[in-house]
Amino acid sequence: MSDLRHDQQLYTVPCIYQSLVLVMAKEIEANGVHHHLTNGKTNGFSKHLNGHKPNGKLTNGHHKDKKHWRDTFWESFEQTPIIVAIWTYLGYGVLVVIGHIRDLLRTMGLEKIKSITEPKLQGFVPLYQSWESFYTRNLYRRIRDCWNRPIASCAGAEMDVLERKSSDHNWNFELTGKKMHVLNFGSYNYLGFADNKGPCAEAVEKAVHKYGNGICASRQELGYTDLHKELDTLVAQYLGVEAAITVPMGFATNSMNMPSLVGKGCLILSDELNHASLILGSRLSGAAIRTFKHNRKKKIQQLKWNVRYFRRRCHEMGFIIYGNQDSPVIPILLFMPAKIGAFSRECLKRGLGTVVVGFPATPIIESRARFCLSAAHTKEMLDKALDILDEVGNKLRLKYSLMPIPNISEKEIELVED
């Protein structure tokens, strides 16, 4: 993209996973950003100059810190071992063949059809593609118990999961009445704000008493208050742009709003590891798309220590993990389809709740478990999770890494625990 003019306006849409940059045709002066830390204890506080000239000198986004962040930048995307890739493809191939055989038996009336079939009506476009329906009933259904687990408590650093059982191979579930208390490594609760006690919970309670529950509605239906306006203004000032619209996190937020921001004739520069919602929204917009290499860092003190510690231990145990050394989302590669469900079930059995992801949300040979670290996790919680991970990794033979152990350390970061 070297032919792009450097003074084109950059509109940044922040996402909890990766960044997405939309390059528009309008040319204006880009705003400078200066990051500032005080005593190393500001937990990521940033002061944005937004193009102002202190003392008559434009900083233009340069860091005053002597140690530039690029000096310590490190991330890993280890290549899939060829043998593992072959076995993964074979595993999916076997499942597809068995699925077609079972579909044939259902067609012949030898096996009961339990899935909902879509009527073929003239003039109506099918809601689901044939492959999508096939995958759901023959592959996803086998390990459906690993998703949509009912939570019976606040999803903080720990949580209660309701136990379910199925007598028909995951077509239907029944609650057993039992609860499992597990470590929560599957929620995007980076700063620990999801807890039902503490300053955030108290502020939310006060806001509900003052504004009511109507603020959960859309902006057209009593869902926009002075609080939302204040947040929009604060975000715009932080990013150095004229205005900003803040929206709750969700798949539809990215996939449905992208086409309203850009369209045919626009160019989207997209992080190669963007979430599926951003990828779908970009494609629906009709804009030209160019991808760039993933580049992301975090500066939150407590969270950063947790991330470095957890990643270092995972590398030392021999797991293949992706991402930047400071990214709180830590994917551990599982590869083979049979190990997706096995990993989730074995971890939950030992008191560890996490998220597993497979095709089509990931490339077919890159199925993974996604660990989401939080500042609310204590070192004792991390150690317990790592012990479980080590045990399950040995049992399922998940330690595929062939690369030397990277030099990742959390020792330079002060551990601050409440």
Image: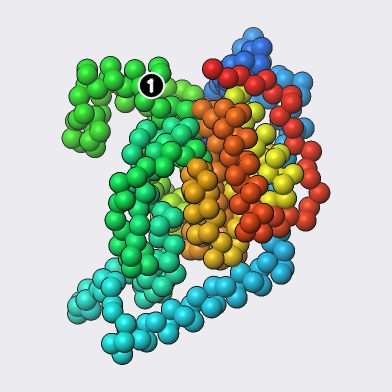
The C terminus appears in which quarter of the rendering? top right
Q: Is residue 79 above or below residue 58?
A: below
Disc 1 marks which amino acid? Answer: Lys
Please state if 5 lies on the left or on the right of 348 as rendered.
right
Percent from the top left, x then y, of residue 97? 49, 82
Whether 215 is drawn above or below 125: the answer is above
Q: Secondary structure at mark 1?
A: loop
Residue 20 appears anywhere in the view = no
Is residue 186 visible in this depiction of the protein? Answer: yes
- Specify whether 326 is left or right of 270: right
Category of crowding for the residue at label 1, using alpha-carbon neighbours closer than 10 angstroms: few (below 14), some (14–19), many (at least 20)? few
In this figure, which residue is indicated by the disc labeled 1?
A: 197
- Number of labels in the image equals 1
203 or 348: nearer the eye? 348
Task: Residue at the far top: name it.
Answer: 55
Q: Residue at x 33, y 39 (%)?
A: 152
Q: Residue pushed farthest bottom?
A: 108
Image location (x, y in percent) of residue 135: 42, 71
Question: Could you say which is closer to the camera, residue 416 or residue 176?
Answer: 176
Left or right: 284 as drawn, with respect to 382: left
Identify whether 251 is placed above or below 64: below
Residue toward you, 102 or 242: 102
Q: Position of residue 385 (x, y in %)?
A: 58, 40
Question: Residue at left 72%, top 64%?
Answer: 81
Q: Is residue 276 left or right of residue 7?
A: left
